Image (cartoon, rainbow, N blue to C red):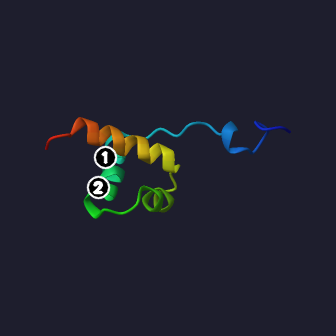
Amino acid sequence: MGLFGKGSRLSQKRRKFTPEYREEAVKMVIETSRPIAQVARELGLVEGTLGNWVNAYRREHAGE
């Protein structure tokens, strides 16, 4: 089947997340000081995806 074969994670359709969902996930990391990896696991997210959201949030809210 190869790297992108049937059933591989790379062949799955991308999930769409609302801005509200992203914000709630980010707040779970920031407000509770829990590791991104732990929150991502709990929510069934890829750690890198949640990390990107957290980094973007921190850039947008720098200085607050």
Considering the numbered disc 2 on the image, is that residue within a helix, a strand or a loop? helix
Above-or-below relation of 29 to 4? below
Q: Look at label 1 and name its amino acid.
A: Glu
Count of picture labels? 2
Badge 1 or badge 2: first in the primary sequence: 1
Q: Nearer the viewer, mark 1 or mark 2?
A: 2
Residue designated by label 2 = 30
Q: Quadrant of the C terminus?
A: top left
- Compared across the picture, whether 3 is left or right of 49 comes to right
**Residue at (47% x, 38% y) in the render:** 16
- Locate residue 33, reporting x and y percent: 31, 62
**Residue at (37% x, 40% y) in the render:** 18
- Compared across the picture, whether 22 is left or right of 40 comes to left
Q: Residues within 10 Å of mark 2 (few under 14, many from 20)?
A: some
Between the residue at mark 1 and the residue at mark 2, the CA separation in whole angstroms equals 10 Å
Residue designated by label 1 = 23
Q: Which mark, by number, is residue 15?
A: none
Among the 4 quarters of the image, the one containing residue 35? bottom left
Q: Look at label 2 and name its amino acid.
A: Ile
- Compared across the picture, whether 57 is left or right of 14 comes to left
- Compared across the picture, whether 44 is left or right of 23 comes to right
**Residue at (43% x, 47% y) in the render:** 50
| 5, 50: nearer the viewer | 50
- Locate residue 55, reporting x and y percent: 35, 41
Among the 4 quarters of the image, the one containing residue 1? top right
Among the 4 quarters of the image, the one containing residue 22? top left
Quick one: which residue is furthest to the right in this view? 1
